[in-house]
Image (cartoon, rainbow, N blue to C red):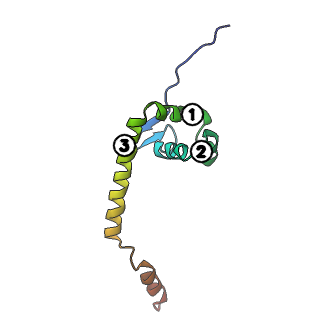
Amino acid sequence: MALAIALEPTPIETDPDGVVRVAKTRVTLDTVVNAFREGCTPEEIGQQYPSLQLPDIYLVIGYYLRHRDEVHTYLAERERQANTIRQEAQQRFNPIGIRERLLARRNQPR
């Protein structure tokens, strides 16, 4: 009996906002790669994100290992975008003094 060898497509897709996700889930490529880089095993990642199938986690990690430069470039761009959004939010909603403002609002007579 011969073993039928089939190529499995990598279960990742890009959503309309340009975010790469594990197919048919909301889990991002960033999440899986960062967990793997922090030392989590595929099984531990699966425990943390039950919507992921273990074979898909292995395929995503395999994709990462084969395309490190491209994935690192993508992750760096995502980090840059996150920093830009964080800075804009901090400028718009200054966190300095927020506790005092909230306490003052809470102590106002109704």
In the picture of the structure, the residue carrying the numbered disc 2 is 40
Q: Residues within 10 Å of mark 1 (few under 14, many from 20)?
A: some
* 1 vs 2, front mark: 2
* Disc on the earlier residue, 3 or 2: 3
Residue carrying label 3: 18
Q: Secondary structure at mark 2?
A: loop
Return the mark for residue 58: 1
Q: Gap in Å between the C-alphas at discs 3 and 2?
A: 26 Å
The picture places residue 56, in percent across and down from the top left corner, at 56, 34
Of the residues under marks 1 and 2, which one precedes in the sequence?
2
The residue positioned 57% from the left and 15% from the top of the image is 5
Residue that extends furthest to the top in the rendered view of this protein: 1
Q: Residue drawn 49% across and 30% down?
A: 10
Q: Eyeballing the image, is 65 above or below 106? A: above
Q: What crowding class fits label 2: few (fewer than 14 Cα within 10 Å), some (14-19), or many (20 or more)?
A: some
Above or below, 102 relative to 65: below
Write down the quadrant of residue 18 in the picture. top left
Q: Amino acid at mark 2?
A: Cys
Q: Tell me the quarter of the image containing the N terminus.
A: top right
Q: Amino acid at mark 3?
A: Gly
Q: Position of residue 39 (x, y in %)?
A: 58, 45
Give the CA separation, mark 3 to mark 1. 23 Å
How far across and down, in percent of the image, does residue 94 sit? 35, 73
Distance between the Cα atoms at labels 1 and 2? 12 Å
Crowdedness near tag 3: few (<14), some (14–19) or many (≥20) residues, C-alpha within 10 Å: few
- Of mark 3 and mark 1, the one earlier in the sequence is 3
Asked which secondary structure carries label 3, the reply is loop
Question: Which mark is nearer the camera, 3 or 1?
Answer: 1
Tags 3 and 2 touching, CB below 8 Å: no
**Amino acid under label 1?**
Tyr
Q: Secondary structure at mark 1?
A: helix
Q: Which residue is at the front of the view, 110 or 19?
A: 19
